[in-house]
Each structure stands twice: as C-alpha cells, then as structure tokens.
C-alpha cells in the first residue's frame, strides 16, 4: 500500500515536470553516466568533458557527421594545391610542412578577440614537459609558429604528414590562463581557471558558456552573447551526472532528464528494450562507429610479459557470444583498434577465435601449469591471478567483466574485478597505476594513426609529465617505425599497406586485447531536432547550435 502511494506521487510529480518543460521549450536537461574531472580541454581525456566543452569551445578542424573534414574555428582547410600548405626543407636534410591557418572572427565569452597569440600560448603549454596535457605529441611536432597578424599564423611541422589539413587543436585563452601557467607550469593542471573559475565566460568562444558547475552533480550552460555563429535555440542546457545506467534510464522516463546522448549514456541493451516500448516518444538511432572497447595490458606485470599469456587470455574470451547475447550481435568483434568502417582497415589482420583448448596449451607452454584447484601457477607457485579495473556504474561493462571473469576461470586464470568511479579510473590510467588489465573504450579519429596509444615515445611517466596515452607501456621498434612512416606517407595506397603492418603487429603482440566496436545507441525525443550522431571522435555536441525543440 505504501509503495503504491509513493509510485503515484512520483508519477504526478514527473508529469508536472514534463508539462512545465514542454511549456517552456527553452531548457534542455541532458543526463550522462559520467561527470567530468578537470574541465581544461588540453588536460582532460574524458569523453564527459569533451561533450560539454564542445558546446563552449571549437577545434580548428573536425570531422562532421558525414565524416567529412571541415573547418570550425578556421575559415578554410589548408591545402597543398592552393599553396596554403607547403613542403619545406628543414635542417639536417629533412622535410617538413608549413601550414597556414586563418582564424574566424571569434571572441571569447568576455568579449576579448580570439587571436593567434592564444594559439602561441596553447602551443607553449602543450610543449612543456610538466604541463600535464593529455598528449603532447601534436604540439611537439610544431617546430615554429609564425604570427602574421591577429587572425593569421603559419605552423611549421617537423615532418610531412598526410593529415596536415586536420589541424584539430583546441586553443585556450592566453589572457586568462597565461598568468596561471607562467607562475608555475608544474602546478598548472591543478590551478587552471577551467577548474578554479569554471564559470568565467572568457574560457570559451562557442555558442554556450558555463554558468553553473556543481562538481559531480550538474553543469549548466547559457548562450554566449559574443558567439559569432548561428544563434543557439536553447536558453539553458543542463547536464546532470547520474553514474548508474538504471538510474539514468529512470530519470529519462520520469521526465527529470530530457535527453541522454548516445555517446555517453544508456547501454545498448537498455535502448533496445526502450525501442520496444516507447517508439511513440523517441526516435532510435544505432550509430556504428569508431568507439573501440578493449582491455589494456600492463606489460610491466611479470605475469603478462609473455605474449603467449596475452594470446591465451584473448582466446579464452568468447567475444562473439558476448556480442550476440548482450548486444544482439550489433557490436562487431574487433581484431585491432582500426574499425572495419575505417578505409584503412585491413581484413588480413589476425583474428583470434574462441578456442579454450588452444588457450590452455599456450599457458602450458608459458610455464603456467594447472593446479588441483583448477587455477594455474608457475614453477615458483606464483598464481596466474590478475586484477581487471574498469569504470563503475556502467551496467553492461560490469556484466562483460563478470562474463570474462567466468570464461577465464575455465582456462585456469583468476580475474579480480575492481570497478572505479570514472574520474578515479581516468587518473589511474593516465598515471599507469593499474596493475594488470583495464577495460574501457577509446573514441578513434577517422583514419587516425594510433601513435599516442602505441608509440614508445607516448608512454606516460613522471619524466614527461604523464603525457601520452600508451598506458600498457608498449615498446616495439617495428611498431614505432610503422607509425612514423604511416604519418608521413601521402599516397593512400602505400599508406594503407603501412596501416596493415600496424594492425599486423598489434594483433601479433597484443599490448591491448581487442573486444568489439561499439554502436552508439541514441534515444532522441521526437521533439528534439538537429541532433546528428557522428560515430567518431568529434561528437554530436560540436553542432549543438543546430539543436532545437519542436512541439
């Protein structure tokens, strides 16, 4: 009886909330399963941060929903044919490139013009070994920045690269951040105004500015009066952070949340179930793309150094069954980090089928014999017991971890699962504090060379300020050579062959255990128009000014 009264009260209050918002039509409440950590776009590597920052900042270039490279903060793409990009000779007989960028007439949210000096400052942050940027490689390869005037600069690159026109850097305001950085570069990541003064309008130049930030709870955005582009339709956008899939779904259905972005929200099985019940309320989109679910291997762990152990682990996981049973087969099994949707995918990459007998044989060869309890140990009685860390609150990821745990047990491998809050998980990974395995997802770039995750120069350490995303600590001279050559190859056919070599080495060495490529499941309210899922690194929120509520 008491339960029914509580349910009635919830239903009435939820209905009132929906009516109030439907009448206003100028506030959009968005729910996600992750709250951002730092809001500094140079330091953060969380998708939760990116989704929000895309509304108040823009990179110079990005791939649009049709996977076409377009200029966002710049007026046009640099091009070898029209002379806005040029091959240049460098000292030592090497070749590089000069790339001309013209900044659009933009203003920071406090009215200060966006200028080439902001790019110059951003470059100095990116290059500093103690600044804490997520990946410094893109900055290090810019040898020189020649400022022509406020809106024009030329970047000299230290190499010839096929993706020279993808100048996808995001800049930060020098007039706000430079005094903080200059005072103590090593403490910049802890003192940036993006965290200490998050509602400062001068921290962005996009269609929205952050007007409220309650850490771990919500972030509100309001229109930026100095935005130079298409006027946004919503007067207020609120992000609510609900770090549990089931609770997020309940908030969506009750009306406490208007929309859950497919990039970071409901799990695929949840959206499939919603489609069967609520086709009248939502438009359902299942966007296949470049979201790569995988397991990083800490190669410093002596239990995991032997490649045969890593191969055995992968062969003991029935990835096809996981996809079929949990995702209705919609999420294809991965063989490397290059999706079959990417034009650089190689069908010749080795595929590891589920083969428990072969996995056991490899473990025998690696010196891990089966004990009486079914678990394996080496000659010194060291048990094959490994910790797997992953993100808490993601119901499906936790289910997958439990399935993998059960499957590896059949091979004699003990897996200990540890779920961490997303912000804690991000910090653990960036400082390489995971001891064995780590399950999470990367959102890949179109034709992106995976240098930051596979090159030996990209292993985070205290020495390089924990920059880089090669969390496994993978180091293979053949891979380094292939990555370097791929970036420099302008001929698409030759580049495809080099990409194939990268994928071959990846599958051979297995510094990362590929699981599957995710489908982003979108349940878009029928009244919400203009949302275009992208399926790649540049998410739908980069075009938030096109979103509107009708009816």
Image (tube, grey):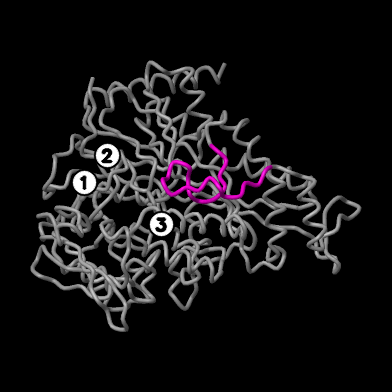
Image location (x, y in percent) of residue 429: 52, 61
- Image quadrant in which the C terminus is located: top left
**Relative to 550, 475 lies left or right:** right
- What residue is at 32 percent from the left and 77 percent from the top? 94
Number of marks drawn: 3
Check the picture and name the quadrant holding the N terminus: top right
Left or right: residue 481 versus residue 68 is right
Residue underneath mark 2: 237
Q: Is residue 351 magenta?
A: yes
- Nearer to us in this view, 487 or 21: 487
Q: Residue at x 21, y 31 (%)?
A: 26
Name the mark on residue 495: 3
Q: Quadrant of residue 280?
A: top left
Asked if 134 appears above or below 247 in the picture, the reply is: below
Residue under label 1, please give it. Answer: 208
Dot 1: element:
strand
Is residue 47 one of those drawn in magenta? no
State the extent of the magenta-drawn residues as a range: 332-353
Q: Where is residue 424 in the image (x, y as percent from the top left)?
A: 51, 57
Instruction: Residue lying at the far right in this picture: please name it.
Output: 372
Q: Nearer the viewer, residue 188 or 312?
A: 312
Q: In this view, does 284 lie above or below 89?
A: above
Label 3 to label 1: alpha-carbon separation: 39 Å
Q: Do the residues labelled 3 and 2 touch (CB within 8 Å)?
A: no
Using the image, tell me which numbered label, if any, was put on residue 417.
none
In the figure, 132 relative to 256: above or below?
below
Examine the residues drawn in magenta and state their main secondary structure.
loop
Q: In which quarter of the image is residue 516?
A: top right
């Amino acid at each position: 009886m008491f339960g029914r009264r509580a349910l009635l009260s919830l239903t009435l209050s939820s209905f009132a909330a929906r009516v109030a918002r439907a009448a206003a039509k100028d506030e959009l409440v968005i729910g996600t399963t992750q709250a951002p950590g730092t809001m500094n776009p140079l330091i953060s590597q969380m998708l939760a941060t990116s989704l929000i920052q895309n509304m108040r900042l823009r990179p110079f270039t990005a791939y649009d929903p049709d996977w076409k490279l377009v200029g966002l903060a710049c007026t046009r793409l640099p091009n070898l044919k029209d002379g806005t990009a040029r091959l240049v000779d460098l000292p030592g007989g090497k070749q590089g490139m000069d790339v001309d960028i013209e900044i659009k007439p933009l203003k920071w949210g406090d009215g200060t013009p966006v200028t080439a000096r902001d790019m110059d400052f951003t470059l100095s942050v990116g290059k500093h070994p103690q600044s804490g940027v997520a990946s410094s490689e893109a900055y290090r390869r810019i040898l020189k920045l020649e400022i022509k005037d406020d809106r024009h600069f030329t970047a000299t690159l230290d190499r010839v690269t096929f993706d020279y026109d993808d100048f996808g850097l995001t800049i930060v305001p020098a007039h706000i951040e430079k005094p903080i950085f200059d005072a103590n570069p090593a403490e910049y990541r802890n003192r940036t105004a993006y965290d200490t003064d998050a509602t400062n309008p001068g921290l962005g130049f996009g269609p929205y500015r952050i007007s409220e930030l309650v850490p771990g709870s919500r972030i509100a955005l309001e229109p930026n009066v100095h935005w130079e582009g298409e006027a946004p339709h919503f007067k207020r956008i609120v992000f609510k952070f609900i770090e549990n899939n089931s609770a997020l779904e309940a908030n969506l259905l009750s009306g406490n949340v208007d929309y859950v972005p497919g990039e970071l929200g409901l799990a695929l099985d949840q959206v499939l179930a919603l489609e069967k019940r609520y086709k009248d309320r939502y438009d359902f989109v299942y966007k296949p793309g470049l979201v790569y679910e995988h397991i990083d291997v800490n190669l410093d762990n002596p239990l995991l150094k032997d490649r045969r152990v890593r191969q055995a682990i992968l062969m003991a996981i029935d990835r096809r069954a996981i996809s079929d049973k949990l995702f209705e087969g919609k999420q294809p099994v991965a063989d490397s980090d290059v999706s079959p949707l990417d034009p650089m995918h190689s069908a010749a990459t080795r595929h590891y089928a589920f083969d428990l007998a072969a996995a056991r044989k490899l473990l025998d060869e690696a010196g891990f014999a089966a004990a009486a309890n079914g678990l394996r140990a080496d000659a010194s009685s060291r048990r094959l017991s490994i910790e797997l860390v992953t993100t808490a609150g993601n119901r499906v990821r936790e289910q997958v971890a439990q399935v993998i745990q059960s499957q590896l047990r059949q091979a004699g491998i003990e897996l200990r699962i540890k779920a961490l809050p997303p912000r804690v998980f991000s910090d653990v990974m960036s400082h390489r504090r995971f001891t064995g395995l780590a399950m999470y997802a990367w959102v890949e770039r179109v034709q992106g060379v995976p240098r930051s995750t596979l090159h030996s120069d990209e292993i985070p350490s205290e020495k390089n300020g924990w920059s880089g995303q090669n969390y496994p600590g993978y180091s293979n001279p053949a891979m380094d050579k292939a990555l370097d050559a791929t970036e420099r190859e302008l001929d698409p056919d030759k580049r495809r062959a080099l990409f194939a070599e990268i994928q071959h080495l990846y599958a051979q060495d297995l510094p990362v255990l590929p699981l599957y490529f995710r489908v982003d499941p979108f349940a878009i309210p029928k009244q919400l128009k203009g949302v275009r899922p992208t399926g790649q690194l540049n998410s739908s929120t980069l075009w938030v000014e096109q979103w509107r509520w009708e009816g």
